[in-house]
Image (spheres, rainbow, N blue to C red):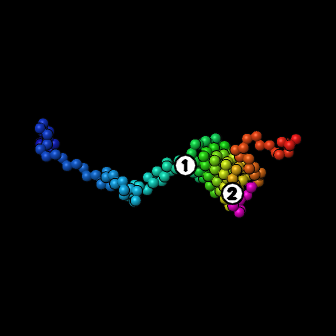
């Protein structure tokens, strides 16, 4: 019986052919073309979303999540689910179906869902579907028609030792 495989101490006379690799995955895109037009690659559908999220630095709390505790980020947070606790980030977006029970603070807060607590932000945007139960401390605020607010608007965000004029005169 002869063996199908033989060992040659000298090595093969002809080099084995390299396995063909898809050119789409191994060839880098030329720099000018990359700026003008994206290079199409297999399985690319998940890559742009992940890359865009990483570039913007947005953490997303999906509709399927319910979080109990404090959230804090030096970047942006987008909430589509439910958070029971305080949220602090550079920018916080609360989506139309989302709910936060606690204080939401940051440079900018955009509310389309529900907050039961307080907002402390330099800029606040309440969309037409917003439902706010609590006080809003702000410098700049935009309220669209249809937004619901049960609380006080306090334009003192960022100011320290704010005293009424009457107290200074006395």
Q: Residue at x 57, y 45 (%)?
A: 75
Query: Which of the numbered marks, if any, corresponds to residue 126?
Result: none
Q: Residue furthest right?
A: 170
Residue 151, position in %: x, y? 77, 51
Per the image, is 122 magenta? no
Q: Nearer the viewer, mark 1 or mark 2?
A: 2
In this picture, which residue range is highlighted in magenta?
Answer: 143-149
Q: Is residue 146 magenta?
A: yes
**Quadrant in which the C terminus is drawn:** top right
Q: Is residue 83 left or right of residue 134?
A: left
CA–CA distance in space, label 1 to label 2: 22 Å
**Residue drawn 77% across and 43% down?**
162
Q: Residues within 10 Å of mark 1 (few under 14, many from 20)?
A: many
Image location (x, y in percent) of residue 42: 37, 56
Quadrant occupied by the N terminus: top left
Tell me the residue that label 1 is attached to.
58
Residue that badge 2 annotates: 142
Quarter-of-image position of residue 103: top right
Q: Position of residue 156 (x, y in %)?
A: 74, 47
User: Is residue 54 among the parts visible in the rendering?
Assistant: yes
- Mark 1 element type: strand
- How many callouts does the rendering have? 2
**Residue 153 coordinates in the image, percent (x, y):** 75, 52
């Amino acid at each position: 019986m002869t063996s199908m495989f033989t060992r040659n101490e000298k090595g093969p006379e002809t080099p084995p052919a390299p396995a063909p690799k898809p050119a789409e995955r191994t060839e880098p895109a030329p720099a000018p073309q990359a700026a003008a037009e994206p290079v199409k690659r297999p399985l690319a559908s998940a890559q742009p979303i992940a890359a865009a999220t990483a570039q913007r630095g947005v953490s997303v709390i999906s509709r399927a999540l319910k979080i109990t505790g404090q959230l804090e980020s030096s970047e942006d947070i987008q909430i589509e689910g439910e958070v029971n606790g305080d949220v602090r980030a550079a920018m916080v977006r609360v989506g139309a179906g989302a709910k936060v029970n606690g204080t939401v603070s940051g440079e900018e807060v955009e509310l389309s869902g529900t907050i039961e607590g307080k907002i402390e932000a330099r800029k606040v945007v309440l969309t037409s579907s917003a439902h706010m139960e609590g006080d809003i401390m702000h410098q700049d605020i935009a309220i669209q028609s249809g937004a619901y607010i049960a609380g006080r608007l306090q334009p003192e965000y960022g100011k320290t030792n704010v005293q009424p004029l009457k107290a200074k005169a006395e």
